[in-house]
Image (cartoon, rainbow, N blue to C red):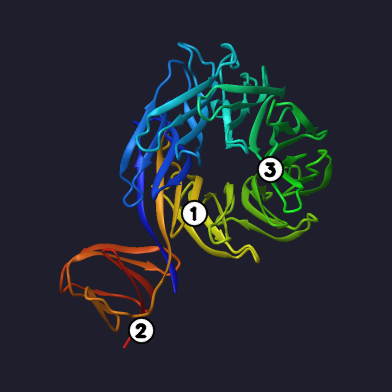
Amino acid sequence: MLIFLLNWIVRIDGSLDTLDKCYSVEVFRNDLIIGGSYGNNIFLARLNGLDGTIKWQKILSFSGYGRNSIKVIRIDPLDSNLAVAGTVYPFSNSSTPCGYIAKFRSDNGNIIWQYIDDDNGSCGSGWPIRTDRYGFSDLIIGPDNNYYAVGSDWEIWYDGSFSNSGRYIVKVNRATGQRIFRSIPGGFMYKSVKSLDNNSVIAVGHGDRGEVQKFNINDGSQIWGITYSDNSRIYALDKLLNGNIIVGGWKNNDFYVGMINNNDGSIIGEWTKNGAGNSLDVLNDLITIGYDIYAVGFLNNGFTSNDAYLVKLNQLLNVVWQKTYNKVPNSNDYFLKIKRAIDNKILVGGVIENSFTKGDLVIYKIEPMTGDTIYSYQYDYNGLLDIAIDFKDINDTLYACGISYSTTNNSDIVVIKWNKFVNLSENVWRSEFILIGNTLKFLSDGNFEIWTVDGKLLKKLNVKKGQMLNLTNGVFIIKFNSKISKIVVKKL
């Protein structure tokens, strides 16, 4: 039988009434690299993969007013060091945000170089109302091994209108951090960037309409570009096996997937999904596997709330299957991210509310052929909001990081490790305990946990030799210290 168990949880709290957040996670040599914000400071840390202890951490402050943060971490394949991108407020007594790219040593966290995209001291201006979308939102290591980051200079005034803006892409030298080019094709923001061939990168985002642009990696010149005519936003992209580009976001308030010819930028096909009326339905992320498309986000359900949504489309943009996720009425459930698991299954993550919480951190593992849930990971701290922002599946382990509110005004960084499924035989007794009918008798002292087969923790105890525990009929997973067994309980 296959099961999984929670291994450890690490919560990092800067202080009371601060918003600490984890945005990105990477696995490096069996350890974990996490990045985000610690109060108003940049936070980057390396955690021991075995027990979650911190090997090193970097908390960097800047002199401006705003929340400095790391949004993306990449591991440089050439030297195994860390490339990061995000947002900083570098100017003293100023609320001006700037894009930030830096390279850190993976062994001790020391800075190798950092690049602040101040564009001769401007970076955007004015008082930021929404700081989370300034600076760089994505970073990739391109086909030439240099770093490409995309983001925005735009700001929002008090009335909600857009002001000065610059949707831009920057290329920096991986060894020195020196800027090679900076291209600003229009206003507002880029959300994502990918390299889908050896000569170009493609960025997606929006001005007052959806935007998709392809850039030459040598000089930053635009090869082709799309500006949608409809009210729209583009947030994600990937490529099919035949070379066509798939983009997604929303269009005229509907969940949107578009197919684009990679050679000339023409739109080949489009697919939309309406949840309820003219309410907003959003695609947050997508991936492709072969000729299939998997996309996640949310649909409005017509009851002033949203259902998390997952859909599979074929290369003709026909629906193969689709799933909505909602545990209670009038809840706001959504998926933020989708990834391909190491065993070619699908992992999706975000927030699902239940009757007792404002939102559980959730990650589902999905069978791509049918859309069926293979298993789910869930985490709730104290009934407040918990959000899965990023996750990484590697070997026999799933790591997740995100945001967990300890009070209504205070959020913590949360990092979780689950051991993936292991093979177990029924009622193979160990020296630590024996099952007699409905009674479990312990033969030594130790730490005892009992779980359902679908991963729900029922009881956790420190037990003594000779202690007995009565159980109901059923199938359970027993963890005694580090050893795991499956038991079938039947009344004699």
Estimate the spatial distance between the alpha carbons at disc 1 and disc 2, rounded to whole Å.
36 Å
Q: Position of residue 423 (x, y in %)?
A: 42, 72
- Mark with earlier residue (3, 2): 3
* Total numbered labels placed on residues in the image: 3
Alpha-carbon distance for marks 3 and 1?
Answer: 23 Å
The label number, if any, that marks residue 490 in the structure image: 2
> Measuring 74% from the left and 28% from the top, which residue is drawn there?
208
Residue 335 location (% of width, % of height)? 58, 48
- Secondary structure beneath dot 2 equals loop
Q: Is residue 211 left or right of residue 361?
A: right
The amino acid sitting under disc 2 is Lys
Q: At label 3, which amino acid type do we have? A: Leu
Image quarter of the C terminus: bottom left
Whole-percent x, y for residue 23 in the image: 49, 38
**What's the residue type where badge 1 is placed?**
Asp
CA distance separating discs 3 and 2: 56 Å
Check disc 1 and report the residue beneath it. 393
Nearer the observer, 181 or 284: 181
